[in-house]
């Protein structure tokens, strides 16, 4: 049963890339499905001077491909209002407040407000402060603040930002977005773990050898050089997306599957991450930066040749590392992570490698140990699972061979499943914070990442150290080799979805 939601969305950064690419299409999908009907309105704010009519035309152009009909798109866009706004100017919040009041009455929104900060993080604190001081918060409905990343650029700055925001909003009114938490297969981690005794009973250091997480990207930094050069892969991907996946993989079962309980378990897992000394960072972490290369006759520029990137940049575009979670369940189990830009192929995958059988009964073809059992979780582009087992090879004798049990969503299912932002906006309308990061998670993640950053900042490194189109610096392979392991994900082994529709 689809229940209509009532809310006023106030989008700060209403002319920006995120609003155009993600928010307007997601809101339209919710409209199409009936979650949004008559009782919703959107105020887009940004510095430029736009009329409501012009804003509506822009919104329509961003949902053109999804629209049921021109009429339907127009009906949707008629709920949109524009206000030119300088985030530092108190007067503008007064105008915003009276527009919000008016729309609340016109659309009967019961005082429900979602403030979406889709703009530079420098302004998050001041906007939150002015929203409160200029009485944009209502007494009658909900007031929720949605914040995009990055939430600070280290623990200190994140803490300062958090204190600033918390002066106006309670923790349970703040929805910190990590779009990975909206992904279907990231949400599936908990289901596969806690819905299967077979899996969960083996989900510990007695049966698991290591866990590997790969977030490989084929694209370079594109137009985001300015931002990326101050961020790098560690802050851009590890602090948020990767550590969120680590938390979901490592956490203890919550007593009930509800936001508070789940987040408490994630916090405990993140707090148990081993914090490295400078020396340990050097042995357990690898950084890289892509260099120019020519693939299929096409020359791809090196990172330092990208627009808005400093020509001697020391920013890493690749990170690989070995993590430990120091608790009863995970003592001694390495978690290997890696992410990078301009790698061979786009692919996000988790591989759980189980320990070998205690005693080998079968003779393998080349007298090698049996390959390990591996559970793979394909996050994207393929969505699905694979379980590698050893079975008897057809024919005489009992020669074992690895087989793969696979299940992947069909192209149709993937195409029709709601996009991450759509799910997250709906969760926020429902007041369900499961798939948003709590401040304590953010804090624990920064504390871990800051150690690595600090160690790296003490020494320059010879960059570039991997060619575009490769799988990163060779040291990231050695990181596992020296422990007797290999990365399971490699560009050719990802299962491609070949389902015929
Ligand atoms: C973003 C990063 O958070 O995630 C980008 O800022 C990165 O640099 C992107 O490209 C990857 O997301 P996805 O969903 O394409 O894997």
Image (cartoon, grey):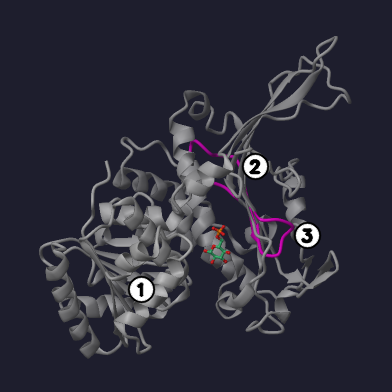
Report whether residue 14 is seen.
Answer: no
Quadrant hosting residue 38: bottom left
Taking the spot 78% from the left edge, 23% from the top edge, the residue there is 401
Q: Which residue is mark 2?
A: 497
Q: Does any portion of residue 404 appear in the rendered image?
A: yes
Badge 2 element: loop
Give the class, few, some or many, for how many residues have Cα within 10 Å of label 3's Cα (few <14, many ≥20): some
* Between discs 3 and 2, the one toward the N terminus: 3
Q: Is residue 370 above or below residue 286?
A: above
- The residue carrying mark 1 is 161
Please tell me whether the stretch drawn in magenta is mainly helix, strand or loop: loop
Element at badge 1?
Answer: helix
Closer to us: 265 or 272: 265
Residue 341 forms part of the magenta stretch: yes
Residue extending farthest to the top is: 396
Report which residue position mark 3 lands on: 470
Q: Relative to 144, is 453 on the left or the right?
A: right
- The location of residue 206, given as percent across then percent down, is 57, 29
Question: What is the x, y in percent for residue 439?
Answer: 35, 60
Q: Nearer the viewer, residue 420 or 102?
A: 102
Disc 3 under 8 Å from ligand 1? The reply is no
Badge 1 or badge 3: first in the primary sequence: 1
In the image, residue 493 sits, relative to residue 27, either above or below, namely above
For label 3, the SS is loop
Q: Specify whether 11 is left or right of 98.
A: right
Report the magenta residues as a range: 323-346
- Tell me where residue 181 appears, x and y as whole percent: 45, 52
Query: Mark 2 and mark 1: span between their CA atoms?
Result: 43 Å
């Amino acid at each position: 049963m689809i229940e209509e939601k009532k809310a006023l969305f106030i989008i700060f950064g209403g002319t920006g890339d995120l609003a155009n690419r993600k928010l307007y299409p997601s809101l339209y999908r919710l409209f199409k499905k009936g979650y949004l009907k008559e009782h919703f309105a959107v105020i887009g704010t940004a510095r430029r001077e736009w009329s409501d009519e012009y804003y509506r035309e822009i919104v329509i152009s961003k949902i053109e491909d999804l629209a049921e009909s021109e009429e339907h798109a127009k009906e949707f866009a008629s709920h949109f209002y524009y206000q030119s706004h300088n985030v530092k100017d108190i007067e503008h919040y007064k105008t915003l407040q009276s527009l919000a009041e008016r729309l609340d009455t016109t659309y009967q929104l019961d005082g429900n407000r979602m403030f979406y900060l889709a703009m530079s993080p420098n302004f998050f604190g001041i906007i939150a402060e002015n929203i409160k001081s200029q009485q944009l918060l209502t007494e009658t409905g909900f007031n929720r603040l949605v914040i995009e990343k990055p939430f600070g650029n280290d623990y200190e700055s994140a803490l300062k930002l958090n204190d600033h925001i918390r002066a106006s909003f309670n923790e349970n009114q703040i929805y910190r977005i990590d779009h990975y938490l909206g992904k279907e297969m990231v949400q599936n981690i908990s289901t596969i773990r806690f819905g299967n005794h077979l899996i969960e009973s083996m989900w510990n250091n007695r049966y698991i050898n290591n866990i590997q997480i790969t977030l490989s990207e084929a694209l370079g930094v594109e137009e985001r050089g300015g931002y990326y050069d101050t961020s790098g892969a560690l802050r851009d991907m590890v602090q948020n997306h990767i550590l969120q996946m680590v938390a979901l993989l490592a956490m203890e079962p919550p007593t009930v599957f509800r936001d508070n309980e789940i987040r408490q378990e994630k916090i405990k897992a993140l707090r148990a991450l081993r914090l490295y000394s400078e020396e340990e960072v050097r042995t357990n972490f690898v950084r890289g930066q892509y260099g120019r290369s020519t693939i299929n006759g096409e020359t791809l520029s090196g990172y330092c040749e990208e627009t808005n990137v400093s020509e001697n940049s020391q920013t890493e575009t690749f990170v690989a590392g070995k993590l430990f979670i120091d608790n009863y369940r995970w003592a001694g189990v390495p978690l290997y992570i890696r992410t990078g830009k301009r790698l061979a192929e786009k692919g996000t995958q988790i591989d759980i490698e189980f320990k070998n059988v205690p005693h080998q009964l079968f003779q393998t073809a080349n007298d090698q140990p049996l390959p390990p059992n591996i559970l793979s979780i394909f996050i994207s582009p393929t969505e699905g699972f694979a379980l590698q087992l050893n079975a008897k090879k057809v024919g005489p004798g009992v020669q074992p061979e690895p087989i793969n049990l696979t299940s992947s969503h069909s192209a149709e299912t993937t195409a029709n499943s709601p996009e991450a932002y759509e799910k997250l906006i709906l969760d926020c309308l429902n007041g369900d914070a499961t798939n948003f990061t709590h401040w304590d998670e953010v804090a624990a993640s920064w504390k871990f990442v800051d150690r690595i950053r600090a160690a790296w900042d003490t020494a320059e490194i010879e960059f570039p150290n991997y060619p575009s189109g490769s799988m990163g610096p060779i040291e990231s392979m050695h990181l596992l080799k020296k422990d007797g392991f290999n990365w399971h994900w490699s560009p050719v082994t990802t299962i491609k979805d070949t389902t015929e529709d």
